[in-house]
Amino acid sequence: MTRAWQSLEDALGYLLRPEDEQSVTNFNEMTPEMVEEMRNLGSRLLATEYLRFYVSNTEAYDEFVDDVLAGTVSEPSTWGRRDVVVFPSDRVSFLVTHESEEILAPMLGVNGERWFRVVPTVRDWWGFPGYAGAPAVIVRDAPYWFELNGASVYNTDSDPVEALPGDIEVTLRRWVASRVARDCQRREPGKVDSISGVCRELQIEESDLSQVGRKAITGLLRSGWPHQRPQPDATRSGHMMDEEQLPPGYRNEDEHFVGEDKLDS
């Protein structure tokens, strides 16, 4: 009878021990000797099988296998470490019905530098809803497997990140306003030019709006949205006609988003 790992065992020249299967949590816990043994297999298929046998979390295995076979992994404990930006990943309906502490809760306990925001651009607003202008924490030297429940994690080199230009509460409300505008982008302006109209589009009751949600929508409407909003340029494959401008939620003064409730930054 053919053994499950026979091809790998044949290449290694020894039998694998059942107790070693998935005994390593992630790539960073592999020893340099394991990496060398994996590299000596000389085959992408066998190298991948090696990881599947020994490592329980094989996220990002493509990149790791490439680096191992290229000979660029000398110390596996530091492989894949990078600075990341962490920001909330909630749906718009959650954002407009909850307060700051609840929205930012996943990030308040993380060990990182705060507060920052992803620089808001129309291109990101159009192509990556939730990213442009998001309030963020930077986690330095995070391992490749780093994740946080209730939050999105991006490499800091994906797009510029800047220190908050002002208050965390204002930053949060602007971002929520921007998210609302993106969700309502394809609706006729006359249907979303009031708080009640926006609530109908988001399928929530106006009475359920939080302070954050009400201030965000009010500030958005005071900016001239939805009658002044970006439009896709069909000739440029998803680019925006006015992509050098700021996206909705960032086109008017802070005073339109300021309220009594402040979150200590």
Image: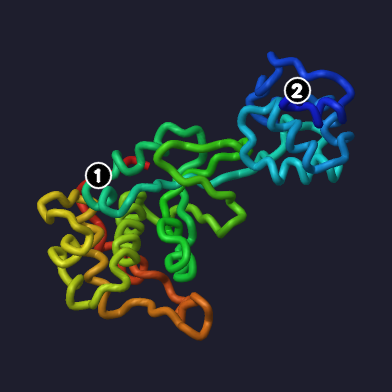
Q: Quickly name the residue at label 1.
A: 99
What's the amino acid at mark 1? Glu
- Left or right, residue 113 beside residue 187: right
- Image quadrant containing the N terminus: top right
Say how many tags the image has: 2
- Left or right, residue 31 beside residue 28: right
Seen in the picture, residue 73 relative to 255 is either above or below; the reply is above
Rendered location of residue 64, percent (x, y): 73, 41
Q: Answer with the quarter of the image where residue 65 lies.
A: top right
Q: Quickly name the residue at label 2.
A: 1
Q: Kindly indicate whether the residue at mark 2 contacts the one at mark 1 (C-beta within 8 angstroms).
A: no
Element carrying mark 2: loop
- Left or right, residue 173 beside residue 231: left
- Extreme front residue here? 1
What's the amino acid at mark 2? Met
- Image quadrant containing the C terminus: top left
Seen in the picture, residue 240 relative to 72 is either above or below; the reply is below
Q: Please report the residue visible at 76 percent of the width from the left and 26 percent of the height from the top.
A: 2
Q: Please report the residue visible at 31 percent of the width from the left and 56 percent of the height from the top.
A: 176
